[in-house]
Amino acid sequence: MAKTTKLLSIIIVSYNTAELTIQTLDSVFADLKQDAELVNQSEIFIIDNNSQDNSVSTIKKWIKAHSNIDTTLIENK
C-alpha cells in the first residue's frame, strides 16, 4: 500500500515542555480544522528528546484524542 503524499508536514520538537507542546498542537489543530481537506492532507511529527516530565504521556493522550489528523510521536531516548 503506497503512502499518500501530504501537502503539509509540521515538525515540533519537545523537551520537558508538556504544556507548551499541547498549546502548540491545539493552535495548529485549530487552524487546520478550518479546512477539512487540509486536515486530511497534513501530518504532524513530534520529536521528544528524552523528556523527564510528563511530556510523552501528555502528547500520547493528545494524539489519541485527535485521531483525525496524522500525528507521529518520535521518542528519542
Image (tube, helix red, strand yellow):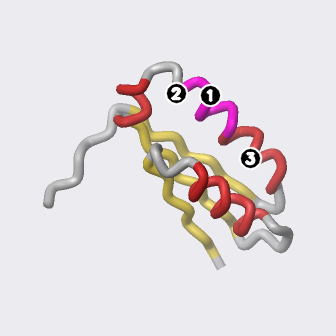
Q: Distance between the residues labelled 3 and 1?
A: 12 Å
Q: Does the magenta stretch include residue 29?
A: yes
Distance between the Cα atoms at labels 2 and 3?
16 Å
Q: Quadrant of residue 24?
A: top right
Q: Residues within 10 Å of mark 3 (few under 14, many from 20)?
A: some
Measured Cα–Cα span from mark 1 to mark 2:
5 Å
User: Bounds of the magenta span?
Assistant: 26-31
Tag 1: amino acid: Ala
Question: Does label 3 or label 1 sit earlier along the sequence?
Answer: 3
Q: Position of residue 36 (x, y in %)?
A: 41, 26
According to the picture, the residue beneath numbered tag 1 turns out to be 30
Q: Mark 2 highlights which residue?
A: 33
Q: Is residue 42 above or below residue 58?
A: above
The quadrant of the picture occupied by the C terminus is bottom right
Local SS, label 1: helix
Question: At 72% across and 73% down in the image, what residue appears?
Answer: 50
Q: What residue type is labelled 3?
A: Ile
Q: In the image, residue 44 lies at what x, y percent? A: 51, 46
Side of 67 relative to 38 (left or right)? right
N-terminal label among 2 and 3: 3
In this rendering, position of residue 20 left or right of residue 4: right
Please report contact status of discs 3 and 1: CB closer than 8 Å, yes or no. Answer: no
**Residue 58 pos. (x, y %):** 74, 61
**Residue located beneath label 3 in the image:** 22
Vertical order, 32 against 77 (above or below): above
- Look at the numbered discs 1 and 2 and tell me whether their residues touch, using CB distance below 8 Å: yes
Quadrant for the N terminus, please: bottom left
